[in-house]
Image (cartoon, rainbow, N blue to C red):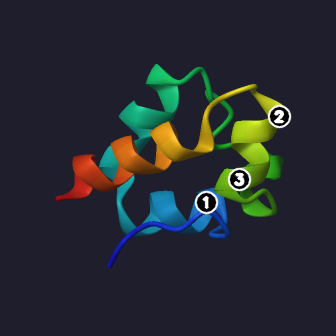
């Protein structure tokens, strides 16, 4: 099942804990903070000035 932009960061990490490495590589280090329970991947990418398409591509490649 592919990771989608509207998924909550915490939910993705709960399903695929190994993707924390990808988030860290992109500078999204607050994967365990309160915001990760409410923030979508799209919102996180925007907040951190990251390309959403590249982040999603890397996350999905990592879980394959």
The image shows residue 5 at horizontal and vertical percentages of: 61, 62
The image shows residue 59 at horizontal and vertical percentages of: 38, 48
Q: How many marks?
A: 3
Is label 1 in a helix, a strand or a loop? helix
Please tell me whether mark 3 or mark 1 is closer to you in this view. 3
Instruction: Choose between 30 and 2: the one closer to the eye.
Output: 2
Q: What residue does disc 3 label? A: 42
Is label 2 in a helix, a strand or a loop? helix
Q: Residue at x 69, y 39 (%)?
A: 45
Is label 3 in a helix, a strand or a loop? helix
- Can you tell which mark lies on residue 47? 2
Name the side, left or right, on which 35 lies relative to 54: right
Q: Residues within 10 Å of mark 2 (few under 14, many from 20)?
A: few
Q: Quadrant of residue 32?
A: top right
Name the side, left or right, on which 53 lies relative to 47: left
Q: What residue does disc 1 label? A: 10
């Amino acid at each position: 099942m592919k990771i989608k932009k509207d998924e909550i960061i915490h939910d993705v990490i709960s399903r695929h804990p190994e993707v924390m490495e990808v988030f860290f590589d992109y500078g999204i280090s607050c994967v365990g903070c309160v915001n990760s329970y409410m923030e979508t991947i799209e919102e996180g990418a925007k907040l951190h000035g990251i390309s959403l398409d590249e982040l999603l591509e890397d996350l999905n490649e990592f879980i394959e």
